[in-house]
Amino acid sequence: MNGWTLFGPVTLLSVVLLFVTYAILFERKVMGWMQGRHGPNRLGPWGLLQTVADILKLLIKEDTIPRNADRAMFKAAPVIAFVPSFVVLAAIPYTKGLLFSDLAVGLLYYIAISSITTIGILSGGWASNNKYALLGSMRSVAQMISYEIPLVMSVIGVVMAAGTLNLTGIVESQKEVWFILPQIIGFVVFFIASLAELNRTPFDLPEAESELVAGYHVEYSGFRFAFFMLAEYVYVYAMAALTTILFLGGWNPLFGIDFIPPIFWFALKFLLMVFLLIWIRATLPRIRMDQLMQLGWKVLLPLSLINIFLSAVLKEVFSGWY
Amino acid sequence: MTYTENYLSVVGFILVGLALPAAALTVGRLLRPYQPSGPKAMAYESGVLDPTGDSRVQFHVRYYLFALLFVIFDVEAVFLYPWAVAYDALRADVGLFILAEMGIFVFFLVIGLVYAWKKRVLEWT
């Protein structure tokens, strides 16, 4: 174990925390503009310190634990939810040289680790001993496992085209054409499923504030609550990066414009994905629970299965360059 | 990077990931007030009375049915991943038989999905 083993993750953690701070501000600003208002604009110039103040406020809030709660599990749940969201970032490559762990099974690693968060959400709802919290967490788990299937299946087309699970290898195989074009069905299914995995509008039923008073984290206050929210935004980072890598060609330039360094190409596509998530949140209403489950199992799952065989056909037809 | 280095890096991520909540909650403990009282420790439900009964109630069976379907298709994915990685090599080796084989495997699982569909397991009402 050399210095980079710990120094690397600490550096990335700072970057991610900075990203989360300003992604929240950006989200509130963009949603404000889309709804014809200003968004946060009081703290600091242009509201730049708004999230910092929010974090400080959460830090000095009293930490209440309900009388009937399972104390040990109540305390463990936010940690179980947060840690996987950060650990998945180990496998994400930013450019050919800038990466933390060049796992041969990078994609599988991401999918496997990210599903641990579900356990954190379930134990949080269970430990709270509150009916809203338990209902919210059960719904959340039902949603997350239902959409994990299309998420996992839709990337098989990408794996077939690239012939590897290594994320660097997947980006390298998109030199000619980004997978969003030949794998358009896979991309659409993956994107919808990733919205559901992120618990974001239109799939934010677990947190439906008007029905479940915020769902599984209703009993959490202060920094324990902050860790659930942090986990969600770290997943926004991770999922935007993963979508960039799998479908948008990672750091490969568009139209061969290669005087812009690869890291900027990556950042550009990554920010585009983040913006897309915010745009959808400001545009679409929340869907109903029955619609949610039917969409997952009756539309996305068959589509992703068809996509696997379509990818095989595509490989036969364009066997030369794809 | 070697195999061990890759996984050591993952261990580093786990350690740092655990350190952040530990550090933040310790700092928070020094800063935040601690004045527990009866009403504060009440479960947030009606706001007036303690909730009646335990909240760990029996759940509708459909949650378990979805969990079972999830297990079936997640295991299917476990078989699909190595197949997809090795597809090119196998295609060169045994030809389109490799596609037919996976077609048969997926077909049997799709029968299960169609059965669940017909039995209205996928409805949420």
Image (cartoon, helix red, strand yellow):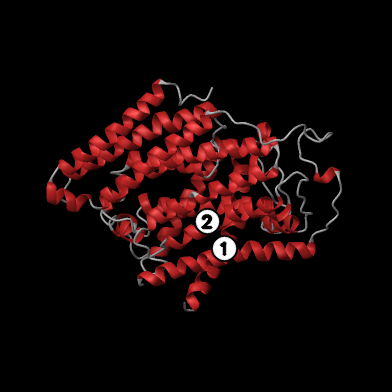
Residue A150 can be seen in this image: no
Q: Is residue A271 left or right of residue A304?
A: right
Identify whether B59 is placed above or below A94.
above
Measured in 3D between alpha carbons, the distance from the residue under mark 2 to the one under mark 1, in whole angstroms, is: 8 Å
For the residues beneath circles 2 and 1, the answer to whether they share a chain is: no
Residue A84 is marked as 2
Does dot 2 land on a helix, a strand or a loop?
Answer: helix
Q: Is residue A296 left or right of residue A61?
A: left
User: How would you rate the neighbour count of disc 1 (Cα within 10 Å): few for under 14, some for 14-19, many for 20 or more?
Assistant: many
Amino acid tagged 1? Gly
Identify whether A294 is placed above or below A194.
above
Q: Position of residue B85 (x, y in %)?
A: 27, 52
**Chain at numbered mark 2:** A
- Write down the residue under mark 1: B17
**Chain at numbered mark 1:** B
Work out which quarter of the rendered image holds the N terminus of chain B and state it.
Answer: bottom left
Does dot 1 land on a helix, a strand or a loop?
Answer: helix
User: How would you rate the neighbour count of disc 2 (Cα within 10 Å): few for under 14, some for 14-19, many for 20 or more?
Assistant: many
Amino acid tagged 2? Pro
In front here: B96 or B66?
B66
Q: Quadrant of residue A54?
A: bottom right
In front here: A56 or B16?
B16
Residue at image x 38%, y 54%?
A: A107
Q: Quadrant of residue A11?
A: bottom right
Circle 2/circle 1 CB separation < 8 Å: yes
Residue A142 can be seen in this image: yes
Q: Position of residue A85 (x, y in %)?
A: 53, 55
Residue at image x 23%, y 35%?
A: B104
Residue A280 is marked as none
